[in-house]
Image: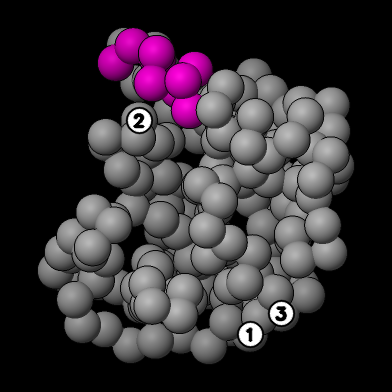
Amino acid sequence: MLKKEARKIYNKKREGISYADKLKWDDLILINFQTIEMPFLQTVFSFYPMEERNEINAFLITDYLHFRNLSLQICYPKMDIKEPNMEAVACKADTVFEANALNILEPLEAEIINPEDIDLVLAPMLVCDVQGNRVGYGKGYYDRYLNRCNPSCIKVGLSYFEPVGKIEDADEFDVALDFCITPQKAYVF
């Protein structure tokens, strides 16, 4: 399957998920995430879920990780659409978020964190293949960012869908996931 085809199929499938199923599947994703053995994490880079895209509620996972380590630093993306590029920005409970030109909520003002200091990235995506190659929205922000992270950074994709056989046009710029968490199970790559 090609990325373009996967985007079309899985965007449509995700749009068709009912609110009741979404809530149930988000909880199952959290439960399956909890089955992964994690090292002590100090800094996590997550994403602000976009309701209009029916994205997974990543706050359930960041809340769980924060519960395990109250000093955990949680970061969210701040994008430079012209480049295109993004940075991880440290956030607190009172951080103000505002929609950018792509209608993605991002922190207004906060401290940029060095990619080398990120312990775990929660990556939004539509689907991945059995080798951990993720299919996102096609702009490459996460692949560019993940290439700047420490090799020991844990890369976790969250998807409502099981991995497909193979993404045929994955290339050397794509950064494979270490894990994909679905409502059915946690996949290890």
Q: What residue is shown with label 1?
A: 116
Q: Considering only order in the chain, which callout, 3 or 2, is on the residue closer to the N terminus? A: 2
Q: Which residues are magenta?
A: 11-19
Question: Is residue 27 shown left or right of residue 116?
Answer: left
Q: Considering only order in the chain, which callout, 1 or 3, is on the residue closer to the N terminus? A: 1
Closer to us: mark 2 or mark 3?
Answer: 2
Q: Please, is residue 137 above or below residue 28 in the view?
A: below
Does the CB distance between marks 2 and 3 fall below 8 Å?
no
**Could you tell me residue 8's position as x and y percent?**
54, 28
Total residue callouts: 3
Instruction: Name the residue: 66% across, 80% down.
Output: 148
Q: What residue is shown with label 3?
A: 150
Which of the 4 image quarters holds residue 143? bottom right
Does the CB distance between marks 1 and 2 fall below 8 Å?
no
Which residue is more in the foreground, 17 or 37? 17
- Residue type at tag 2: Asn
Pick the quarter of the image with the C terminus: top right
Q: Residues within 10 Å of mark 3 (few under 14, many from 20)?
A: some
Which of the 4 image quarters holds residue 125? top right
Let me know if residue 18 is in the magenta part.
Answer: yes
Q: Marks 3/1: CA distance? A: 5 Å
**Could you tell me residue 31's position as x and y percent?**
54, 30
**Could you tell me residue 6's position as x and y percent?**
64, 30
Instruction: Name the residue: 46% across, 85% down.
Output: 113
Q: What residue is shown with label 2?
A: 54
Local secondary structure at mark 2? loop
Instruction: Name the residue: 34% across, 11% down.
Output: 18
